[in-house]
Image: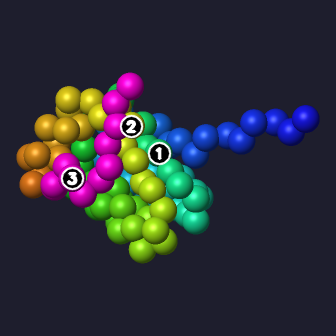
């Protein structure tokens, strides 16, 4: 019997600052070509570069016609999107 497929989930870091941007981009790119879920439940702060990584991923997944979902966005995550003026509807979001 085959092992169950591992979900394509990336847990976003608590602090999404300059230091988190490059590692986050590398992790996300590793899932390119497959549906991806980003777990934003623990996010406390988002900086501009990490927001760019997320928006770039959204565009890449849209071009590939694959779902990119934000799972369980924290209040801080949603508030940060609003502060940056990033539209929430631009990324599909789900909650438990």
The residue closer to the viewer here, 79 or 88, is 88
Mark 3 lies on residue: 89
The CA span between labels 3 and 1 is 15 Å
**Which residue does the image show at 61% across and 41% down from the upper left?**
7
Q: Is residue 4 left or right of residue 44?
A: right
Res 71 → quadrant: top left
- The CA span between labels 2 and 1 is 6 Å
Which of the two discs, 2 and 1, labels the residue nearer the N terminus?
1
Disc 1 target residue: 37
In this rendering, position of residue 68 left or right of residue 45: right
Q: Could you say whether the residue bearing mark 3 is in a helix, strand or loop?
A: helix
Q: Residue at x 48, y 71 (%)?
A: 64
Look at 35% across and 68% down and name the residue there: 59
Mark 3 near mark 1, Cβ–Cβ under 8 Å? Answer: no
Does residue 37 show up magenta in the picture? no
CB atoms of marks 2 and 3 within 8 Å: no
User: Which label is found at residue 71?
Assistant: 2
Picture layout, residue 14 above or below residue 17: above
Q: CA distance from mark 2 to mark 3?
A: 14 Å
Please identify the quarter of the rendering in which residue 96 is found. top left
Based on the picture, tell me whether residue 87 belongs to the magenta stretch. yes
Whole-percent x, y for residue 63 in the image: 42, 74
Q: Position of residue 24 (x, y in %)?
A: 45, 51
Disc 1, SS: strand
What span is in magenta? Answer: 86-96
Crowding at dot 3, Cα within 10 Å, few <14 / some 14-19 / many 20+, comes out as: few
* Residue 90, numbered label: none
Query: Split into 4 quadrants, where in the image is the N terminus?
Result: top right
Circle 2 Cα neighbour tier, 10 Å, few/some/many (<14 / 14–19 / ≥20): some
């Amino acid at each position: 019997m085959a092992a169950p497929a591992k979900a394509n989930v990336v847990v976003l870091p608590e602090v999404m600052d300059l230091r988190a941007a490059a590692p986050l981009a590398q992790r996300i790119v590793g899932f390119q070509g497959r549906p991806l879920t980003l777990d934003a439940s623990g996010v406390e702060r988002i900086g501009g570069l990490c927001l760019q990584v997320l928006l770039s991923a959204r565009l890449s997944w849209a071009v590939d016609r694959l779902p990119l979902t934000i799972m369980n966005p924290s209040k801080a995550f949603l508030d940060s999107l609003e502060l940056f003026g990033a539209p929430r509807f631009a990324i599909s979001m789900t909650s438990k």
